[in-house]
Image: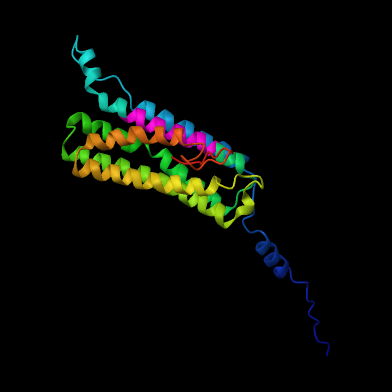
Amino acid sequence: MKTARIRHEPSTSGAILSRSHSRKFSRSETTRAEAFSDGVFAIAVTLLALNLAGPPHKPGGLGQALLAQWPAYLGYLASFGYVSVIWLNHHQAFVRIRAMDRGLHAANLFLLLTTAALSFPTAVVADALQADPTGSDARVAVALYAGLAAAMCLSWVAFYQQTVRRPELLDPDVEDTYVRHGQLRSWAGAVAYTVAGLLGVFVAPLLAIAVFVMLPVFYFVTSEGLPGGRDGSPDTGPHA
């Protein structure tokens, strides 16, 4: 009696498994990350402008109504300045970055997450200050704004930390002080916004607003390095 011969086909599971292991997250060029980031920045500033609306008023009362919504103007000024500095420094960051990995993509997305959300606390602060500049709602509102702004600074900390862990992502000719100054300014921003929030909660909300307006100016002025730390090469550390 003949026994049936079983034909063994070459197994492809090993090859499939090998291919799946080889398809890990690989480095990529920065072009798509830059384009996506620019789109988010553009939407962010557009959302800020949408918070500026014509106020309801009685006939002949437009001038007074416009003056009464001064918190909306201050909020727009502070937030537009913040996003603008971030956009400028983000561009300078990608002048120095030659490749992206998963960690750097994650840090960049964290930055974009906080940037896109900035219009929300801006509108909350404007409404609360317009209702009562010294009330409890205004204090909560400035704390909300300060918390998100500090989180944005911390996203830059994560961004720089990834370049420390993976220096090969940077251009070989990047300035020696670039990452160090960027880290210092990022931590300084997180601390400054936190202190501003505490001042707004426990002292006066308008003090926090003053800090919110001034901090983007500080970061713009120091975008080529901290005082006393310049070494003749520009250092536009990307953060706000």
Which residue occupies 35% across, 33% down? 214
> Which quadrant is home to the N terminus?
bottom right
| Number of numbered discs | 0
Q: Quadrant of residue 121?
A: top left
In percent of width and height, residue 52 lies at 33, 24
Please indicate, yes or no, whether residue 60 appears anywhere in the rendered image: yes
Is residue 88 inside the magenta stretch? yes
Colouring scheme applied when the structure was drawn: rainbow
Magenta highlight on residue 219 = no
Q: Which residue occupies 27% across, 39% down?
A: 142
Single out the residue that lies furthest toward the front. 228
Image position of 236 (left or right of 81): right
Please indicate whether residue 54 sits to the left or right of residue 184 in the image: left
- Tell me which residue sits at (40%, 32%) in the image: 217
Camera-side residue: 178 or 161? 178
Q: Position of residue 75 (x, y in %)?
A: 32, 30
Picture coordinates of residue 212 (x, y %)? 33, 36
Residue 79: image x %, image y %? Answer: 37, 33
Q: As rendered, which of 216 and 108 lies closer to the eye?
A: 216
Magenta part, dominant SS: helix
The outermost residue toward the bottom is 1
Q: Quadrant of the C terminus?
A: top left
Q: Over which residues does the magenta segment extend?
A: 75-91
Quarter of the rendering containing residue 193: top left
The single residue placed furthest to the right in the displayed view is: 2
Q: Nearer the viewer, residue 68 or 186?
A: 186
Q: Is residue 160 left or right of residue 146?
A: right
Q: Residue 43, relative to residue 144: is it above or below?
A: above
Q: Is residue 56 visible?
A: no
